[in-house]
Image: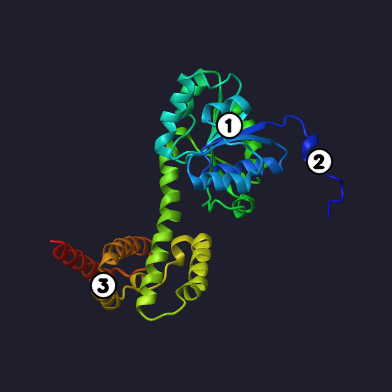
Amino acid sequence: MNTTPQPDPQDRPARLTVGVVGAGRVGPALAASLQLAGHRPVAASGVSDASRRRAAELLPDVPLVPPAEVLQRAELVLLTVPDDALPGLVTGLAETGAVRPGQLLVHTSGRYGAKVLDPALRAGALPLALHPAMTFTGTPVDVQRLAGCSFGVTAPEELRLAAEALVIEMGGEPEWIAEDRRPLYHAALALGANHLVTLVAQAMELLRTAGVEAPDRMLGPLLGAALDNALRSGDAALTGPVARGDAGTVAAHIEELRAHAPQAVAGYLAMARATADRALAHGLLKPELAEDLLGVLADGTHGTEGEAR
């Protein structure tokens, strides 16, 4: 065990004043983690009541001010607004003269790289794209979850060390993403995380309809094991009737979903076809069984389209 006394964060050099533009779920958590590293949050902006509550909980005593004033007060500014709002915000801040030369301007959008900050770059700012690959709740637990969290980082080469240092200070692990690969990177995360929530919510609804009183308790161990196996083994972790080629079971699933949860049929068919393709490509699904299975999935598609008409 290392017993060497650790320096107080306030004694470290180059501590920065930090501002947050957009006190949604992400910004206050990142600012709070930077505060733990010795930086000093000095201002935040937030409009909704929820944003104000989050700022008050995670950044107590930090004043809420307009975005331009956040930039006036802070050396490091976190732009944590929705993706679609980011380009207009950056352009507006640059055009109004709010951006100061030498100011670190960090956005947390997964979709965009550093180029979206070009208007601020031309005003002398130092642009960084630091996207935490984590889902946020808007509560203090988010600060803890940043420990070991990967960040998708895009920045000019000369700012590489600064970007890495900030991520590490927040407890994260920097992962460099090329500017032109940011949309693909973000699509991958959305596919894995956002769609997972939809699948789990649908599964719980179906279990309740089937009479299960505690679907979360039933699914927890199963989904935890499935996720662990998938992360360890990839496609080799595929199990279930589609991977086995049990066409009759899949047909029964589709029939039951049509009767009790027609809104889930399209998603089931899409995921089943994708699973069948991957199982077949990796030798898990026998070709002689795949034909009947794919026929069932095709018939299911036609049936769904017929109902829609």
Q: Earlier in the sequence, mark 3 or mark 1?
A: 1
Q: Earlier in the sequence, mark 2 or mark 1?
A: 2
Give the secondary structure at mark 1. Answer: strand
Picture coordinates of residue 181 (x, y %)?
Answer: 44, 38
CB within 8 Å, label 3 to label 2 = no
Picture layout, residue 94 above or below residue 253: above
User: Quick one: 48 or 309, which is closer to the camera?
Assistant: 48
User: Quick one: 75 or 102, which is closer to the camera?
Assistant: 75
Q: Which residue is mark 3?
A: 254
Picture coordinates of residue 99 (x, y %)?
Answer: 54, 22
Name the quadrant of the C terminus: bottom left
Q: Residue at x 27, y 65 (%)?
A: 263
Disc ID at residue 77: 1
Q: Rate crowding at label 2 as few (under 14), some (14 to 19) or many (20 or more) other CA atoms within 10 Å.
A: few
Drawn side of residue 216 relative to residue 3, left or right: left
Q: Separation of disc 3 and disc 2 at Cα? A: 61 Å
Q: Confirm whether residue 157 shows in the render.
A: no
Q: Confirm whether residue 225 shows in the render.
A: yes
Q: Separation of disc 3 and disc 1 at Cα? A: 51 Å
